[in-house]
């Protein structure tokens, strides 16, 4: 059994990340669901939706919940349903999601580490290499 994955974000951010990641990978190797939290939402409905998706995803290996912004509504609502077999990591980005999806057989604690490393190591400042040939038009 593998860990389930739930992505909870503002609007369609999570769905867009999911579609980009599965396009890059060619498929989705984990049981994954996305919750798009709209700006006009009912708190109890969102808690219920997230709880039901977690129950559906959990096959005793746990569920990793990725949220977009720590302290914002999607993260705060997800925290209301956090349980013993549920872990929440905020700051989801494409490198984080691809890293998680590349390790579908890891345990929940190991997958948390992969999520965090993927998210942080995927943020890099681009520094172009100066090529004297390119600068001269060659």
Image (cartoon, rainbow, N blue to C red):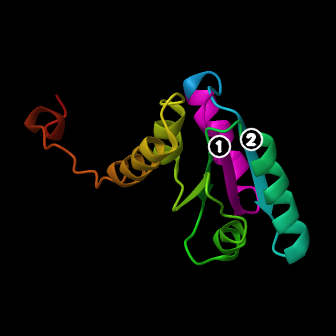
Left or right: residue 103 compared with residue 21 = left
Seen in the picture, residue 6 relative to 25 is either above or below; the reply is below
Q: Residue 68 is drawn in which quadrant?
A: bottom right
Q: Position of residue 71 (x, y in %)?
A: 58, 78
Going 46% across and 38% down the picture, which residue do you hit?
Answer: 99
Q: Is-magenta flag for residue 66?
A: no
Seen in the picture, residue 28 relative to 114 is either above or below; the reply is above
Q: Where is residue 102 in the image (x, y as percent from the top left)?
A: 49, 30
Magenta region: 1-24
Going 42% across and 42% down the picture, which residue do you hit?
Answer: 110
Going 59% across and 36% down the picture, which residue do you hit?
Answer: 21
Q: Position of residue 24 (x, y in %)?
A: 56, 28
The label on residue 57 is 2
Going 51% across and 44% down the picture, which residue do you hit?
Answer: 108
In contact (CB < 8 Å): disc 2 and disc 1: yes
Quadrant the C terminus occupies: top left
Query: Depth check: 95 or 62 in front?
Result: 62
Q: Where is residue 124 in the image (x, y as percent from the top left)?
A: 31, 52
The label on residue 5 is 1
Q: Are there few (<14), some (14-19), or many (20+) residues within 10 Å of tag 1?
A: many
Q: Looking at the image, can residue 127 be seen? A: yes
Q: Earlier in the sequence, mark 2 or mark 1?
A: 1
Quadrant the N terminus occupies: top right
- In the current view of this chain or complex, which residue is farthest to the left? 132
SS class, disc 1? strand
């Amino acid at each position: 059994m593998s860990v389930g994955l739930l992505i909870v974000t503002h609007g369609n951010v999570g769905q867009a990340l999911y579609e980009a990641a599965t396009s890059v990978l060619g498929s989705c190797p984990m049981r994954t669901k996305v919750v798009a939290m709209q700006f006009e939402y009912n708190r109890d409905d969102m808690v219920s939706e997230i709880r039901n998706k977690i129950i559906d995803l959990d096959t005793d290996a746990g569920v990793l919940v990725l949220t977009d912004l720590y302290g914002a509504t999607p993260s705060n609502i997800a925290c209301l349903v956090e349980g013993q077999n549920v872990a929440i990591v905020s700051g989801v980005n494409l490198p984080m999601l691809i890293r998680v999806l590349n390790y579908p057989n890891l345990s929940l604690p190991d997958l948390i580490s992969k999520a965090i490393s993927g998210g942080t190591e995927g943020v890099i400042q681009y520094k172009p290499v100066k090529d004297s040939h390119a600068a001269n038009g060659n």
